[in-house]
Amino acid sequence: MKCKILHESSGRIRVHIEQKHMTMDQADILEYYLRALDGVSEVKVYDRTGDAVIRYSADREDILSALSRFRYEGNEVLVPENTGRALNREFEDKLVFTVLAKGFRRLFFPTPLRNAYETVRSVSYIYKGVRSLFSGKLRVEALDATAITVSLLRRDFSTAGSVMFMLRIGEILEEWTHKKSVDDLARTMSLNVEKVWMKSAEGQEILVDVNDVQVGDTIVIRRGSMIPLDGKISAGECMVNQASMTGESAPVRKVTGSLVYAGTVVEEGECSILVEKVNGCGRYDRIAKMIEDSEKLKSASEDRASHLADRLVPYCLGGTVLTYLLTRNVTKAVSVLMVDFSCALKLAMPIAVLSAMRESSVHQVSVKGGKFLEAVAEADTIVFDKTGTLTRACPTVAQVVTFNGTDETEMLRMAACLEEHYPHSMANAVVKEVMRRGLNHEERHSKVEYIVAHGISSRVDGEKVVIGSHHFVFEDEGCVIPEGEAEKFNELPDQYSHLYMAVSGVLSAVICIADPIREEAPEIIRQLKELGIQKVVMMTGDNERTAKAVAAQIGVDECHSEVLPEDKAAFVRAEHEAGRKVIMIGDGVNDSPALSEADAGIAIADGAAIAREIADITVSADNLAALVTLRMLSKALMARIDHNYRNIIGFNSGLIILGVLGIIQPTTSALLHNASTLAISLRSMTDLLE
């Protein structure tokens, strides 16, 4: 590609691409190509001018060489579904057209025609105001309509036109600011890549990237996993949680022939899905819809702002009437009408929350709504699941102890066949160990049944195989230790977690899992307490001895061992009854009830899809420090909202006083009011954690 250097300084270069016209798609391809280069920190491509500004720390010649090699065709750079460029262009054009149209009318329209135009244009504003009154509520539309009507009755067409012009500019800027916030957040949250089990032509299940799946392929979705693509069930039966689409958390029964949709989660059963659609169902669209439509988005602070804004409208109208009665000056009265608290309160508060959600995504924390950021800020109790949360998300197989004369390699292969279908950290450890050893394992088992918080049951070559906890294998399934091997069983190393596997009712192997505590866990818990968390609790299915040892190392206040999913949820309910606000952190299907019960449920991204779906917040970072960041960000958000309240009420009250005193005109009031609303909204979009 040919380009010309327009300007450069240390670590920054501006180049012009030598082509007649650059499309928005081409600009996106070039921008993301340059961003992917080593040593490039920031890139901005301007499609209107064909210029690119690059900030870099790499060698200058490497950047220029990369530009010379660049071609649009065949470029494999990964460009997101939605880059925000089209959105910005849409509102830039609206803004420019509105300003130019105003100037054109002022320069070329004769006064009578201009007055007639403003009169006709006022009809839509007056209609909105009248409709507001007939709805039984006094809203800001009534104030706008009153100001315009009074100006027209006074035959002050210039003021009426200026008011409508400022209102239109304000509408464009408000809509742009809000949509940009939603767009930034949705784009940040949608960048992860999903994996899926796909059936090959031979009937084998292969783990592939979801982007490799084509229409007509068959994918297999099991309990706790997300459905990544639209399709129709070709085999099996399941209960599907469709909350991401409908907002209803009650699962829906799906049978052969039923349609299923991307972003929903299988809660019970399993199914094979014939893929019918691979485009247009991306994560960006799903997340953007969730952000805009979900009632979860609104925090109590946002609700208070909205209600306060509506309650203040009658006072503004009353103040206008009172000002006129006292001064007999219509201009002063209209100046009061030009200032309302509603716009700033209703825009700045949601923008602050959306910006905080976007910022949390930068720190690898995805939040589904402002309600949950507020809950994190106010929480005084935090409950941790142990495995995969306080311990590493990727434990390792330390030892395989065989029984009943079985072969270690064969037992590990068999365990991997069963465990690979379920996203849990201990299951992942088994699968990774098989991969590390370079062992191939064929799919010889029949349908797999997963019992939450207990284990897995299936049949291999006609024999029943179970793998899971001690309670599941020996008590629920009634399996026995082979004769003469009790001493060997009793000498199993205590420092490891154990997965027990039995074939035909007889113990065949115990897989010892090393599950090291996260190095940062003790420090993170200390920091959370410094940030106001009063009670830190650990809950685990491990035995009491192992649980207490871990609790002592990390410094929790309470420890509960050998708990079932319902026990975790019951504990959260008990804390609520005691008047506490609770954060629950987990990663497995067994944590889902407690995640749903908590004021803010936080799921670890490497865990089960159902946990991520039910949870209010998902942490993708491989470090618990993200929890401290989340707490700090949440508290900073609450402080910003309080600050916005004071600024909005104070500044707009000042404008009203200046208008009543006759110091500023109505058009100036409208200008300053809209400017302050925009300024506060833009300030609310800045990062909370510098």
Image (cartoon, rainbow, N blue to C red):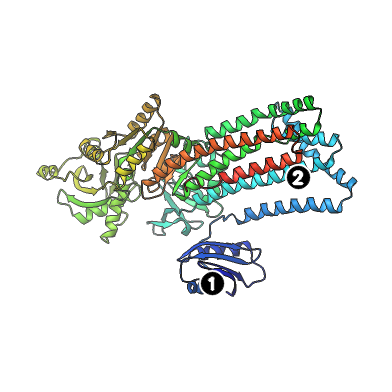
In the image, 456 versus 330, the foreground residue is: 330
Q: Amino acid at mark 1?
A: Leu
Q: Residues within 10 Å of mark 2 (few under 14, many from 20)?
A: some
Q: Residue 240 placed where, x, y %?
A: 46, 40
Residue appearing at x 46%, y 53% in the figure: 192
Question: Which badge, 2 or 1, comes first in the chain's sequence?
Answer: 1
Q: Quadrant of the N terminus?
A: bottom right
Q: Which mark is residue 165?
A: 2
Residue position for label 1: 67
In this picture, residue 421 sits left or right of residue 241: left
676, 265: nearer the viewer? 676
Task: Report the side of 686 relative to 495 (left or right).
Answer: right
Q: Tell me the CA gap for discs 2 and 1.
A: 44 Å
Q: Is residue 417 left or right of residue 231?
A: left
Vertical position of residue 280 compared to residue 126: above or below: below
Q: Secondary structure at mark 2?
A: helix
Q: Secondary structure at mark 1?
A: helix
Residue 68 location, x and y as percent? 54, 74
Q: Which mark is residue 250?
A: none
Where residue 338 appears, as percent x and y from the top left, is 73, 36
